[in-house]
Image (tube, grey):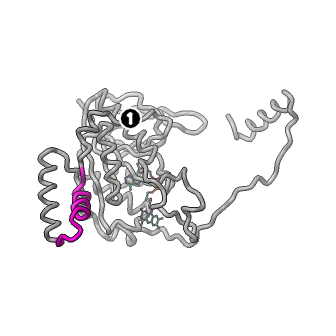
Amino acid sequence: MGYNCVVLVKQVPDTKRITGDVMNDDGTVKRSALPAIFNPEDLNALELALQIKDKYGGHITVITMGLPAAGAILRDSLYRGADEAILMTDRRCAASDTLATSYILSCAVKKTDYDIVLCGRQAIDGDTAQVGPQLAEKLGVTQITYIEELTELDGKTITVRRNIGNGWQKVKAELPVLLTVVGDANNPRVAAARKMMKNKNALTPIEVEQKIKAQNPDAEPADIKELAEHKCGQLADKGLLIKQWDLDTVEADLSWCGQSGSPTKVHRIQSVVLAAKESKEIEPTEKGLSDMIHELISDKIIA
Ligand code: FAD
């Protein structure tokens, strides 16, 4: 029968490369100083959607809310096998906290026809893991978090295995559902050469305009607009125009978006260095190691 999957993906700064040089004095990160990458667990979410499509058929739509540069991860999604990509971009989204982000994403997802919504468990920059669950609430669908395996899809019923830290739990639910996917769920496939050749020139309208501006620095805004419209028309004819939505397209209530929709207030950012308060010497003998392991088990540090 086939399943319509919507995958939410986020472009993030590569936080593995954070050094003192990329930090601002106020404790925030200079985002432009770090390479922008596909949020790692969103690649696992996309891979799970691709596996569903491989096995059962269906359609995969990828959505990102972000700056125009996030077009790069949409192209990457098309190279890996997504059918359709949508950039949700609007200056009025700026300063959105997770509540506003999930509201805006919910408005976008509601414009699609979906059976399964897939998110990464967590983004490596904001790091809250809140967006998936908040989005499920706003869509009014069942959420299953920490998915490490899709066990079965049978008609309108999905069975999955979720990681619960010290073990796993098998959960059955009726579609539609929202899944948040962990990094151990799968090994994301790489881009397919043929899909890459097909989609390498795919652009969003805002990227088209930026490109034309760069090529014609002295052109009048009206001329740029005309040239951009013409180019977008050509791309659309070839199926290479990536959809771009704003808050009006998704009929969002502006009071729920950006700063006005964000109750989170950051008062102070503090750099916390964790230091061990106590240390313990272990005899380098079998008994010493065995005692340590038993102590860690009884303290529930390891299972
Ligand atoms: P998580 O909850 O950890 O993400 C879980 C999953 O949700 C991801 O794996 C992905 O599948 C999905 N997801 C998350 N975000 C997106 C997205 N944007 N598009 C598609 N899917 C997504 N950030 C800015 O960029 N600009 C700002 O001006 C800004 N202002 C902020 C102001 C405040 C007061 C606060 C608290 C945060 C602000 N942020 C801003 C950060 C922003 O709120 C978070 O980055 C965003 O809400 C996602 O939260 P997260 O990164 O913790 O994602």
Q: Position of residue 186 (x, y in %)?
A: 45, 33
User: What residue lies at 28% left-to-right and 67% top-to-bottom?
Assistant: 253
User: What residue lies at 33% left-to-right and 37% top-to-bottom?
Assistant: 80
Q: Is residue 18 magenta?
A: no
Q: Is residue 115 visible?
A: no
The C terminus sits in image quarter: top right
Q: Is residue 120 visible?
A: yes
Q: Which residue is mark 1?
A: 190
How many discs appear? Answer: 1
User: What residue lies at 81% left-to-right and 30% top-to-bottom?
Assistant: 290
Give the image quadrant in which the ligand numbered 1 is located: bottom left
Q: Position of residue 213 (x, y in %)?
A: 23, 65
**Part of the protein shown in magenta:** 203-221
Q: Nearer the viewer, residue 110 or 184?
A: 184
Q: Is residue 207 magenta?
A: yes
Q: Quadrant of residue 256?
A: bottom left
User: Judging from the image, what secondary structure is the residue with disc 1 in?
Assistant: loop
Q: Nearer the viewer, residue 52 or 173?
A: 52
Q: Position of residue 96 (x, y in %)?
A: 40, 65
Q: Position of residue 49 (x, y in %)?
A: 34, 37
The N terminus sits in image quarter: top left
Q: Is residue 146 left or right of residue 225?
A: right
Q: Nearer the viewer, residue 173 or 228?
A: 228
Q: Nearer the viewer, residue 281 or 265?
A: 281
Relative to residue 288, is residue 199 depicted above or below?
Answer: below
Q: Is residue 206 left or right of residue 9?
A: left
Q: Amino acid at mark 1?
A: Val
Q: Quadrant of residue 215?
A: bottom left
Label 1: how many Cα within 10 Å (few below 14, some 14–19, many 20+): few
